[in-house]
Image (tube, rainbow, N blue to C red):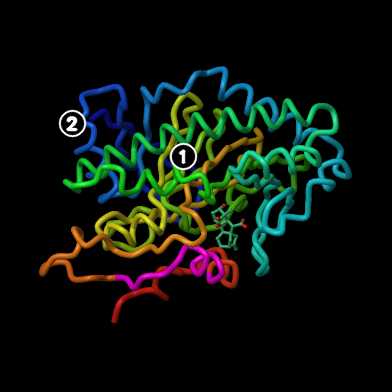
Amino acid sequence: MVVASLSPVHGDRFRSLAIPVIDLSCHRALTSELIVRACEEFGFFKVIGHGVPLDVVSRMESAALEFFSLPVVEKQRAGPPNPLGYGSRTIGPNGDTGEVEYLLLHANPSSISQQAGMVSRRNPTEFSCVVNEYMETVQEVACKILELLAEGLGLRDSGVFSRLIRDTENDSLLRLNHYPSCHNKEDMRSDRIGFGEHSDPQIITLLRSNDVGGLQILSPSSMDGAVWVPVLPDPTAFHIMVGDLLQVMTNGRLVSVRHRAIVDSYSSRLSMAYFGAPPLHEWISPLPEMITPQMPRCYKSFTWAEYKKAMYSLRLGHNRLDLYRAD
Ligand code: GA4
């Protein structure tokens, strides 16, 4: 395993930490073992050797930049986010805010083409094609990671996680985030929150950012309370996050990582997050193979639709998994 070192930036309490870097083009058995270890320890790792063509990423990035550079009134045609669409500064329906503007798109091709009409007046068809191509490519990488993960966990069915996001009715999303840099000196603080602390509710997140830093993860095993670890940007890689549903299905063996984004005062950051999610009607519960006498069942069963309903009724930083702990 290659290890990347993280340099401390601003924030409250921070420390530098080595996070795992996993090369997906390496030997399968070794890679799957490393993925499991990274997901247990951090719920977070970086992948290289992922095989996503550079032009697929560049086309998506250019389309996102083109959208965010439109006049505000134009962007607002694609909003407000309920929950999909364009939003600025408000996050979710319960009063959370951040120094960010964003576009939330559903992975479903018909939903993308519907949204494309509001996002791009110039060429909605081209926008749909670019988003569909990016989604399909990134979904493949997500499935590969999930299959390696299942193998590394020794599960009989290596498709047990990936099948959920391959399902034609999957509820996966793409979030394009633009964190603008500061225009005036008064705002140049080192602790401006772009996107507050939270874990991602879905199964898995694949995040690609430009070369501007800002992502921080909460160090899971720190003895001295919460410590934020800044992640060095790498536009050629993807950062992978374990989501709440994967924590439940693995009966708490893998952890969903808490993270946040800080705004850089001098450069604007663009991130593109793919959230792999199951169909709405899908029942989520700890896999029987993950329940042992040493590790009794930790979570109750619920459908993804139920979980979504709960998450939209709560604040961004809420520890929503606590609601589903088995007694
Ligand atoms: C966090 C992860 C994804 O960005 C997101 C977010 C969603 C939203 O922006 O609409 C939520 C948040 C996220 C979890 C709690 C609720 C819903 C904002 C919020 C306060 C798209 C998602 O799926 O959940």
Does residue 157 lie above or below 249 as drawn? above
Looking at this rendering, what residue extends furthest in the left direction? Answer: 293
Give the x, y percent position of residue 146: 33, 42
Q: On screen, 282 above or below 108?
A: below
**Could you say which disc has been placed on residue 127 in the image?**
none
Quarter of the rendering occupied by the C terminus = bottom left
* Magenta segment includes 203: no
Q: Which residues are drawn in magenta?
A: 299-310
Location of ligand 1 given as a quarter of the image: bottom right
Q: Residue at x 73, y 51 (%)?
A: 87
Q: Position of residue 115 (x, y in %)?
A: 74, 43
Kind of residue at disc 1: Leu
The residue under label 1 is 206
- Label 2 SS: helix
Residue found at x 63% / y 28%: 60
Instruction: Find residue 206 and report its horizontal and vertical position in percent.
Output: 46, 39
Quadrant, the N terminus: top left
Q: Is residue 67 left or right of residue 224?
A: right
Residue topped by disc 2 = 30
Give the residue at x 31% y 27%.
Answer: 24
